[in-house]
Image: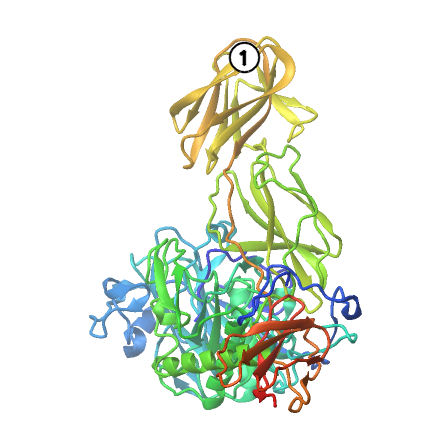
Amino acid sequence: MPLTSSFFPARRRVAARAATVTVAAVAAISLTAPLASASPVAVPSAVAVPSADAAQTSRPAPAARVSGEKVVSVPAEGVSGSAVRKDAALDGAVAPEQRQGGAAASTSAPDVAPKDLAVLTPERSAGTFTAAGITWKYTAGVTVVEASIRVREQGKWTAWSDLEVPSVEDSSVRAQGGRDGTEPLLTLGADAVQARVITASGDAPQDVRVDLINGGTAAAPEAGTAASGRTVAHSQPAATRPLSVAGDALRPKGVVTRAQWGAQEKYANPSKVRSQSLKAMYVHHTASSNNYTRAQAAQAVRSFYLYHTRSLDWGDIGYHFLIDKYGTIYEGRKGSMDDLVLGTQAGGFNTSTIGVSMLGNYETAKPSSAGMTALRKVLAWKGYAHGLNAQGTTSLTARVSGTSTSRYKNGTTVKVPVILPHRQTNNTACPGRNIMSKLPALRKNVAADIAAANAKHGVAGSPVRAVVPAAAYSANKPVTVNGVLALKWKRVAYASRYQLMVRESSQQGAWAGTDYWEAGATTTALSTAYTVKAGRTAVVGVRAIDAQGRPGPVTRFTQATRPVGTGKADLAAAKFASVPKLSGTSNNAGWSSKTKGATLTIKRSTGGDILRVLASAPKGASFTVKQGGKSIGTMKFAASKAVQQRNLNLPSRASADIVLTLSSTQPVTVRDLSAARPTFKVASQPFRAAGPSRVSLKATPSNGRYAWNANKEAAKYVVEVDRAAPGKKLSGAWRAQATTTATTITVKQKSKETVRVRVRAVSVFGRGGSPSSYAAVTAR
């Protein structure tokens, strides 16, 4: 079940909400497998590599025509006197002191008294809905420990469903009015609802609502019609990129696209965050009804999407992929097919992971064979694409702030299986005991699929190489007065466009992690520019993207800090006068004074290691400098009309005010103030060369002539020979015989010498595939 992330974008209310109703109230090639080279293969002119593939994707199925989608928000305030007197009002409720991380700690917990309730609504009739959840405005000091719903289906009330309360870990969300809330309860069609909320203090959060979602109706998507499998046409005889690129050899066919299941993109505000690498893959279930039809499965996906985007303002559906019991795979979060988009599916552990959710409740029901097969396909595809060991382990670091369902504190590094259940890191029963029991076999099967793909299709790798800068860039400038970072790079084979990638931190902010970038604008040009905002520090990079939308690794270019801005939140000036229209400065302004004791204060500066001041002092000037109230040194400016720069090391990188106090009485004009940061290194994402498929050999060689079928993925072939003298056995010591672009070769043999020959293709990226061996031949 999805949980919010530290890094999803600030949630926003989408203007287009007509359906929302508020109810009032190879340079050198090793000859041992696998072959790899840091340098591209030199492809002969007769086998010219095109700048990009001439791709032709299969015609996509038409987008779903959905009708009847609706979101209804019903106010839920106080405790209904009539409702609390009914026997069912407190069924299954757990007292706050028995709660840990939002999950019941004991099934034998004492009964909850009416005084413990923060909210209990009456039983309310409503139009037909397919999902329901509880949301509220974040309220400081109020912690929701239980939020439950029960609904009326076909005239009968269900038992209370204790809904998971995801953690909201991004303070900017709350600052901009984003709402907290539960996961939704899915239903096949209910017409009444009752909600219950228990908090640690007994006080209700502000603006509690019950959101009722109708996912609308549409024809069931046809399995196998989605344009997820690619057919690519290439000019011949040019070598093409191998099918191992981005794991395409295992890309499942028939993935139902967002358009096909009916995602209205006007509600989406997709995350810009891209993980640097994939380390682990989460398995979830939606904990909803298992008695759905094919059409209702797509409706359930739409219900999740509407609730996540319009009720919780997450910007998109939380999962990367969803799978129904019929084995249909649904594209989830936008961009998940080809990129490592940050999801909201495992609170505290969303970076470097993806989440695949099975539609249904697999605590009570057993997953279908079709569903488990589809899950295996998705995990094998992504595991193959990113070189994962499906039976191995990896390390994830928790990123948690505030209330969270994470089992681990912020900053804790946890060793987990590469394929793991949601409950491994979070307080939840997800994905249910009946999927839990199948995970060992699932891991084994996925590992087997990946191994088979490596042998047949070659090692998976990046679709394009890393961008190479066209000029020299320093790792850290460290200050840019005008904020403009101009970037230029060389053309990358197979790239159709390039994307700016950014990491940026505010004057008061701290770097949150080294394992992700934020995706910026794209361009078809070989240059771009990024403007750093006042007081902020930015790290910029570029990546290439091919015609199919598959990105390559990010190349880090440079880093720079722009001087502090003039806003009251950034800088305070006491007894300094503002100097407008001061050319050559970052803010087109400065500050002047000749009053001893006048101060300039950089507010809550965080992470800086060097204070840089630009000033002019015709008769000389000096400042004393304090950081966090502690004196750290002085800055002296010689008598000169020229602009002078002075630097001072900052002993602490913790958040603190930096105060410059004028200790002289001569006039001075301060032009710029900067707290430059040390070089921030985003974890490297090395280029992974994709290998080609195995060579198909022709008939038994004759008279030393060996032939094989042309491999369209081969830029060239490496021929290796193992020889044994008369009367000796082959040793297995393979030696290079030739590197060729031809599909035949003649191997000479001495009398009674035994020879065994093998051939392997080398991809346009310089990686060799698995070898194909001929039977040993002994000369007469």
Instruction: Tell me the amino acid under the disc marked 1.
Output: Ala
Residue lying at 55% horizontally and 79% vertically, measured from the top left: 723
Decide: few, some or many residues near mark 1? Use Cα within 10 Å; few <14, some 14-19, many ≥20: many
Tag 1 secondary structure: strand
Residue 47 screen position, x and y as percent: 76, 70
Q: Is residue 143 above or below residue 387?
A: above
Q: Position of residue 82 (x, y in %)?
A: 33, 72
Question: Does any portion of residue 71 appear in the rendered image?
Answer: yes
Give residue 239's position: percent from left, percent from top: 72, 72
Query: Splitting the image into 4 quarters, where does residue 481 fall?
Result: top right
Residue at (53%, 54%) from the top-left corner? Answer: 684
Image quadrant in which the N terminus is located = bottom left
In the drawing, does residue 777 fall left or right of residue 373?
right
- Mark 1 lies on residue: 621
Instruction: Please give the name of the residue rendered at 56% of the width and 62% of the height, measured from the top-left corner.
Output: 315
Position above or below: 488 against 430: above
In depth, the one of 203 and 611 nearer the eye is 611
Instruction: Report whether 175 appears left or right of 242.
Output: left
Judge whether 719 appears above or below 42 on screen. Answer: below
